[in-house]
Amino acid sequence: MCLYTHCDDSNSSEAQYINLEQARAHSDPTMSTEECLWREHVVQRLRERDRKECENFKEIIVQNNRLIDHVAQLKSDNLKLSVENEQLRNAVSTGGTGPNVAIATLEKKLLAQQEELTDLHKRKGEHSQMIVDLNLKVEQQKELLSEKEHSLYEQQTANNRLRAEVQLLHSSLEELKKLNTTLLDEHTALQLAFSSLEEKMRNVQDENRYLLERLMRYRAKDADKLNEENESLIRKRLPSLFRKRSAKLKRDLEDAVREPNSAVNPIVPAPGGTPLHRNSSPAQFGGPAGSDDEIDDGSINGAMEALGLNDEEYISARFMGGEAVHDVVRPNTNTSIETLKAAGYLGQPNPTKIFMKFEAHENESHAVRWSPVERMVATGGADRKVKLWDVGKGSTEPRAVLSGSSAGINSVDFDSTGAYILGTSNDYGARVWTVMDNRLRHTLTGHSGKVMAAKYVQEPIKVVTGSHDRTLKIWDLRSIACIETKFAGSSCNDLCTTDSLGSTIISGHYDKKIRFWDIRTEKQADDVLMPAKITSLDLSKDCNYLICSVRDDTIKLLDLRKNQVISTFSNEHFKISCDFARASFNSGASKIACGSADGAIYIWNVNGFLETTLKGHSSGSVPFFHSTAVNAVSWSPNSNSLASVGKSKRCIIYSDS
């Protein structure tokens, strides 16, 4: 009875829900098609659930309904028999004896009916218990079905997601196949081009070897001929001049030996044990003009032996102006080096005096550069500004402040005419300003890392920039667009170009390599490996020599004609201040200057020895020199002046007078 009622109630509620939804669909014409489809889907699912639930219990329900009908019929018969029985009892009580047999029969029949009714009640109880058990099973099946449906929904969702991923992977695979095909074609083409170029290179190398052999033969012949002519000329025409110059030099040396009471010069022992007092005055080496006959040969020879040199070596030292000091002076004759330095034979004097000093920027100063045409200095700092300073007028106020950068300035540089100034920045860009009106002309953006250096190429048409994104970019200033990108494979810290045409670009990188790029052939020459990462590069004016500051606290001098290091400059107190510390040649490429982490500036002669160190002291609370690390130095191209900037925000201009 319970199962029957439950099914009837379920059918009734589902029918009511279906009728209600159909009525709502008919009454709401604005209902969307998607919502109608969803409701129809729900109705269909309810009908299917009703059909599945009732199908298993259909026969039981039918049998139960039959039993219920039979019980109702038996109840009706029992009621009738009870009425008849009561009537018979009334009749017996009134004294009737005829129907005694009928009464007994009816009583038997009633007893049989009661037993049958009891049996039916028993069967009804069993069926009710069966229905309860079946209802419990139905509930369990519903829960299991709900779990299965939830799991099915999750599996379908995961399946859809995986199908989408598979579709995406298929499309990516197709793209990669196309790209692979393209790369294979390019690789084949490049291999063919490489084979052709390699063949050409071998031919050119063979031709170069042949031409070099011819050149060496011609040079050997020319040298032999020139030596013969020189010997003949010396023998025939210049014996007196040779003797006069040799005698004058020996007389100067004798005068230097005869200064026994010099308080400022050390004593150098002569080979024979007699102490030799060295006078470092340039006047002693220059010597006044005197008679060639006033020469004591014994004194001259003693002085020559004291310095450990012969006639030819000292004639070279005297008349070559110190250009071959390392070849002339023997390794154990430090006295002769000091004497030549003091005599002024090793080039112009050093800029040891402070000409002016000023606070260049609000924060740390990173870059400094002299104008090629006037006494003006450009500085760049962490305050995102490029400032121009008029050194010729000695003004400590900036001549102009060039803005436009959104991050700190890393380098500044002028073009050869001094009309444009180029600055690089940490905001991944480079900018060009005009010096005349201080206006921002171009902004070059396209790098994905901070730009550390920039130089003009084929000025004023093109610019090359080097960045920490491991690329070099060449820009056309007419279209303000990148026309070529060179992939170096390592962060670029500095670069320079060999000439105004910019046929060769030289770049220094974090991976310790100096790279050479020929923009005419779009190929890279051989690299030069340094012992540590490179912080700066600078070229001599004749483009034959390159200095390279290295993070192992040394400066390397390279001969670009041989592509090899010919000298190394270092000092026990010299320390490179940062990864972008800048070293600089002087105008004659005879000296090298670089700042140190201790605030000093070291100046070396290109022949290999340290000439001076610009390192001062503090007077009160104001230091005369840099009190913190020096980041960059720049030598004036038109005078013997040196500009320096560092972490103390200060710019100091040094001069020799």
Image: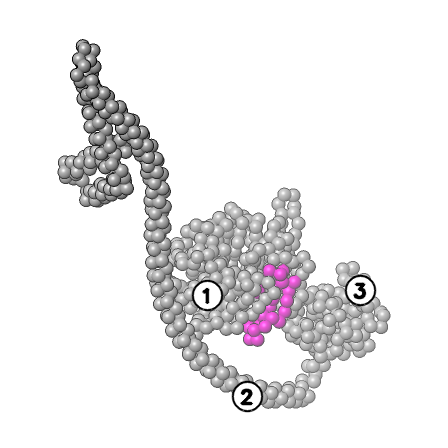
Tag 3: amino acid: Ile
Image position of 21 with respect to 361: above or below: above
Q: Is residue 399 left or right of residue 291?
A: left
- Mark 3–mark 2 Cα distance, whole angstroms, equals 53 Å
Is tag 2's residue or tag 1's residue first in the polypeptide sequence? 2
Residue 533 drawn at (x, y percent): 57, 62
Gap in angstroms between the C-alphas marked 3 and 1: 58 Å
Q: Quadrant of residue 480?
A: bottom left
Of 265 and 490, nearer the camera is 490
Crowd around label 2: few <14 · some 14–19 · many ≥20 (10 Å): few
Q: For mark 1, what is the residue?
A: 487
Residue underneath mark 2: 214
Residue at x 48% of width, y 62% of height: 470
- Secondary element at tag 1: strand
- Whether residue 90 is visible: no
Query: Judging from the image, what secondary structure is the residue with disc 3 in?
Result: strand
Q: Nearer the viewer, mark 3 or mark 1?
A: 1
- Res 602 → quadrant: bottom right
Numbered label tally: 3
Residue 73 drawn in magenta:
no
Residue where numbered disc 3 is placed: 267
The C terminus appears in which quarter of the rendering? bottom right
**Farthest top residue in view:** 94
User: What's the magenta region?
Assistant: 548-570
Label 2 is placed on what type of residue? Arg
